[in-house]
């Protein structure tokens, strides 16, 4: 169970997250949509303190953190319970695919190296990249790099996987294989919070869709409710725009 209450973040004078409340059930797949600059990435990044929230409470499993007075050990605890998939992959250029996956297992989860290597190899097999274990990111296609990025998050066995526009930096030809891998992650009943502009994919994979606008969740519902019967005029305008 994930529970977020009163999550607030301001950059300078600009409020970016305005009292966000959100509960996510175990195994639930929640997709966030909304216009650029409304705080979608910031929401994801605040959950593991890549951005530090100003206020609010975050519960992931057995850990509850009060953002305003979070201590180092609690922040590490949130990071242990979340896997993050970045738009730009964020792989270490000087590490192989396998070493990229091992990194957090060794440094954050404190696994012995041999165990981390074995888990990385198992994940590479699951992502269809067993033969790329010793390749550096520069020798991989965009789609392969992002599959390593997803594998790195899968390897953590995290309670929550966060995806921030995982396909939007990809050439169109690589989008399909990355979405396929996300479908396989979903089949494992992994709890997922996904920001995406792939509306067809959102409709297919989401249990629930959140529409964010100006730092707030202004509407939420099933894919059918959001796409076929949107209520808020801002959501109606957004959907009209993205469907061209
Ligand atoms: N590190 C930062 N410093 C200052 N302002 C920031 C920072 N990161 C984000 N912002 C601002 O916060 C607001 C929300 O940004 P965020 O990246 O969360 O939006 P988003 O919904 O993910 O947009 P997009 O769809 O373009 O990715 C924007 O106005 C952005 O300019
Ligand atoms: Mg963003």
Image: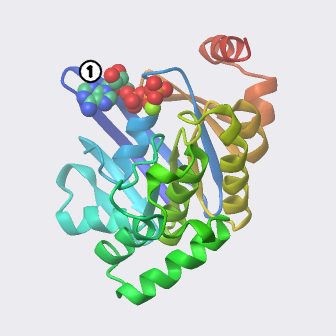
Residue 154: x and y, percent? 54, 66
Left or right placement of residue 73 versus residue 2 in this view: left
Q: Is residue 161 left or right of residue 105?
A: right
| Ligand 1 picture quarter | top left
* Camera-nearest residue between 219 and 43: 43
Q: Position of residue 233 (x, y in %)?
A: 64, 11
Q: Nearer the viewer, residue 83 or 39?
A: 83
Camera sees residue 243: yes
Residue at figure coordinates x 33%, y 77% from the top left: 106
Marks counted in the figure total 1
User: Quarter-wise, where is residue 78 in the image?
Assistant: bottom left
Residue 20 position (above or below residue 161) = above
Q: Secondary structure at mark 1?
A: strand
Q: Is residue 14 above or below residue 102?
A: above
Q: Closest to the observer: 70 or 142?
A: 142
Which of the image's four quarters has the C terminus? Answer: top right
Residue pointed to by mark 1: 14
């Amino acid at each position: 169970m994930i529970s977020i209450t009163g999550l607030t973040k301001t950059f300078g004078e600009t409020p970016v997250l305005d009292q966000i409340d959100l509960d996510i059930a175990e195994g639930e797949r929640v997709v966030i949509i909304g216009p650029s600059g409304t705080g979608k990435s910031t929401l994801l990044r605040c959950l593991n303190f890549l951005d530090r929230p100003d206020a609010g409470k975050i519960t992931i499993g057995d850990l509850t953190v009060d953002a305003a007075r979070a201590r180092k050990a609690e922040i590490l605890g949130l990071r242990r319970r979340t896997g993050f998939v970045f738009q730009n992959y964020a792989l270490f250029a000087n590490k192989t695919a396998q070493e990229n996956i091992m990194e957090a297992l060794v440094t954050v989860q404190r696994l012995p190296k041999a165990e981390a290597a074995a888990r990385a190899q198992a994940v590479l097999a699951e992502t269809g990249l067993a033969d790329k274990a010793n390749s550096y990111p520069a020798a991989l296609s965009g789609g392969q790099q992002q599959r390593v990025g997803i594998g790195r998050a899968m390897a953590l066995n995290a309670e929550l996987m966060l995806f921030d526009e995982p396909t939007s930096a990809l050439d169109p030809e690589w989008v399909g294989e990355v979405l396929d891998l996300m479908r396989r992650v979903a089949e494992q009943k992994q709890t997922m919070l996904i920001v995406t502009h792939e509306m067809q994919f959102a409709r297919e994979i989401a249990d629930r869709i959140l529409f964010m606008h100006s730092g707030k969740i202004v509407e939420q519902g099933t894919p059918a409710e959001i796409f076929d019967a949107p209520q808020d005029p801002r959501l109606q305008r957004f959907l009209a725009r993205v469907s061209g």
